Amino acid sequence: MAKIIAIANQKGGVGKTTTAVNLSAALAAKKLKVLLVDADPQGNATSGAGVARGSFRRSLYHALVSNENLKNTIQNGAIENLYVVPADKNLAGAEIDLVDIKAREYKLKGILDEIRAEYDVIIIDCPPSIGLLTINALTAANSLLVPIQCEYYALEGVTELFDTLARIRRLFNPQLTVEGLLLTMYDERTNLSAAVAKDLRDFYGKQVLETVIPRNIRLAEAPSFGQPVTVYDPKSKGAEAYMQLADEVQSHDEKSIRKGIERAAAKPHDAAE
């Protein structure tokens, strides 16, 4: 059963789509079967993962609004084990079209539940806003990963997103956890990046991931070639950082499994007492 990770931040330009594409590709490179769901009408995750614009007739919009079977929308990504539910400009209309649908906040969850047994990981790239598409993603997800640009307005955006997270837990998805806060566009040459990283780690502690995504020209170039950076330049610092992030995300699952086993093993002992 696939773990579903929503990647969201209502601030634009923080590396959200870059993270969705390259984390998906890095996990796929580790032989996991990965589905990248592009829930952003801009469709940048679609093209960045290797699905050319205009090369598909059905998108996430048709699955959400027209009850198209999600399997009919899935495209092959740039590498083996990477699959994409594409988005295009039609998805912008979903915010309006979903309003009158019963249980509209659970629409994405319902269609993903039908296919999640076929994948190891499902990653959702959310739009840079807290509308129905993002709410659907957070309702469907097991965890939330938040990319944060290393700049001084970062804390403001995170605080607002955590307020939204609390509401989603209360109203729709009490099991939603925080995968982590991911520092992006880190420039080791500046005091600013180091200061922002320190502030975030001091404030949020272990919720901030150990992996840091550096500013890297290869990361910026890769989307124009329709490739994840792990394909475009696998030896670049950007590619290495996302492979490290994939390892860290996998380690979270291993820790959860170990804790579950430990709890299960403790139950008979507790009952005997």
Image: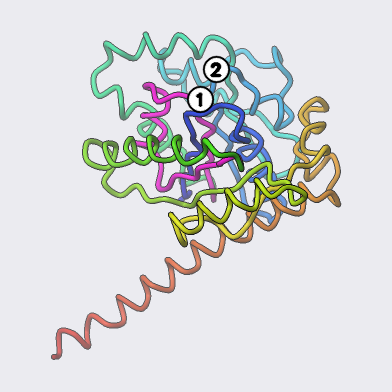
In the image, residue 30 sits, relative to residue 190, either above or below, namely below
Left or right, 271 with respect to 51, comes to left
Determine the secondary structure under disc 1: loop
- Residue name at image x 34 percent, y 14 percent: 98
Give coordinates of residue 9: x percent, y percent.
49, 34
- Crowding near pointer 2: few (<14 within 10 Å), some, many (20+)? many
Q: Is residue 147 magenta?
A: yes
Determine the secondary structure under disc 2: loop
Proximity of marks 2 and 1: CB atoms separated by less than 8 Å: yes
Disc number placed over residue 52 in the picture, else none? none
Mark earlier in primary sequence (2, 1): 2
Relative to the observer, which residue lies in front, 15 or 27? Answer: 15
Give coordinates of residue 177: x percent, y percent.
37, 51
Q: How far apart are marks 2 and 1 (CA)?
A: 7 Å
Q: Residue furthest bottom?
A: 273
Residue type indicated by callout 2: Pro
Q: Is residue 32 magenta?
A: no
Comparing marks 2 and 1, which lies closer to the viewer?
1
Relative to the observer, which residue lies in front, 9 or 76? Answer: 9
Relative to the observer, which residue lies in front, 77 or 182? Answer: 182
- Stretch of the chain drawn in magenta: 120-149
Disc number placed over residue 41 in the picture, else none? 2
Report which quarter residue 220 is drawn in.
top right
Give coordinates of residue 57: x percent, y percent.
61, 12
- Residue name at image x 28 percent, y 41 percent: 166
Image quarter in which the C terminus is found: bottom left
Residue ID for mark 1: 127
